[in-house]
Image (spheres, grey):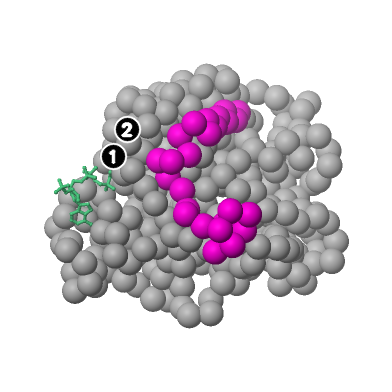
Amino acid sequence: MTLRAVATGIGHYLPERVVPNSEFEAQIDTSDEWIRARTGIERRHFAAEGETTSQMAIKACEAALAHAGLSAADVDGVIVATSTPDLTFPSTATMVQHGLGMTQGFAFDVQAVCAGFIYALSTANAYILSGQAKRILVIGAETFSRILDWEDRGTCVLFGDGAGAVLLCAEESAGAATDRGVLAVDLHSDGQFRDLLYVDGGVSQTQTTGHLRMEGREVFRHAVEKLAETAHAALARSGNAAQDVDWIVPHQANLRIITRTAQKMGVDMDRVIVTVQDHGNTSAASIPLALSVGVARGQIKKGDLLVTEAIGGGLAWGAVVLRW
Ligand code: COA
């Protein structure tokens, strides 16, 4: 027998305001056609004035707990993946913990930009396998609309806001590739690429919040190369092969990246969860949002083998293989 971290609840929250591509046409030199053709994005949600990352995360957690049939009193850890925290400190996770009415357990943030949820899932898995925690809320929550340069057409049309949460619970399992739960993790980062995707402000360097800057074409090139590699590595480590995969649940940045990664993995697009058309790139929130939507649509079912993969600023990238 071995311990596994099994997803027993999932939920998400999207801000009310939906912004179609056409809204950008009046402000910058772009078009709905260009954005759809180059990215697959049709619309995204933007947080309301005053609506914070922690508020969205709390709503996603409440939905995940309801889905699991558990309450916040049953949880002993909260990990929030975000690059857009409410404040420099304390952590957004402690605000979520408090918002859920918890005084027990631990809470902290993980910052790996668009790969943040993969890193948070891997961290929560390690805590569960080591016996330090039994039930952890793993959240991806972002308000990227707060760090966009509205005059930079190469970036401002790509991102959106939202939050997704998964409840991971310790369960005794057989220790086989057919177990439910997290089966394998593969993580990487390489700081030599920091100038490809970064925010030009921060506490220590500028004492400002800053704006997102990106070399889109270069990030695209790295993404296509690295995502299939990391997904393959995690899959091999899990004792499964590409033909065993029921769903790829990729980071939702660009439909062309999603399609090419699936092609490289030899997985048909009808086995890929795609939400980028409705959410844009929500950074660390994108995978839990896609998981939640995939479950709600009836695509992802108990026992399905999932591969999640993401890349973002750092560069940081990785994949998690789990059976739902
Ligand atoms: N509307 C219209 N034209 C635009 C535009 C927009 N919103 N954004 C850029 N362009 C223009 C560029 O200025 C360029 O014009 P030029 O040839 O006159 O210089 C042209 O479109 C092609 O630009 P390029 O950057 O080569 O386009 P692309 O096909 O690489 O698409 C991205 C740009 C950003 C969509 C693409 O590079 C991408 O998705 N990269 C990865 C981004 C990503 O996923 N980042 C997050 C990872 S977590």
Q: Which residue is mark 2?
A: 221
Identify the residue shown where x is 39% and y is 68%: 45
Q: Position of residue 319 (x, y in %)?
A: 52, 33
Q: Are marks 1 and 2 in contact (CB under 8 Å)?
A: yes
Name the one closer to the observer, 279 or 85: 85
Mark linked to residue 217:
1
Q: CA distance from mark 1 to mark 2?
A: 6 Å
Q: Secondary structure at mark 2?
A: helix
Q: Amino acid at mark 2?
A: Arg
Tell me, yes or no, whether the highlighted magenta stretch contains residue 204: yes
Identify the residue shown where x is 29% and y is 29%: 263
Q: Classify mark 1 as within 8 Å of ligand 1 or not, answering yes or no.
A: yes
Q: Position of residue 140 (x, y in %)?
A: 56, 55
Identify the residue shown where x is 62% and y is 58%: 203
Name the one closer to the observer, 19 or 75: 19
**Residues rendered magenta in the picture:** 184-208
Q: Position of residue 136 (x, y in %)?
A: 72, 51
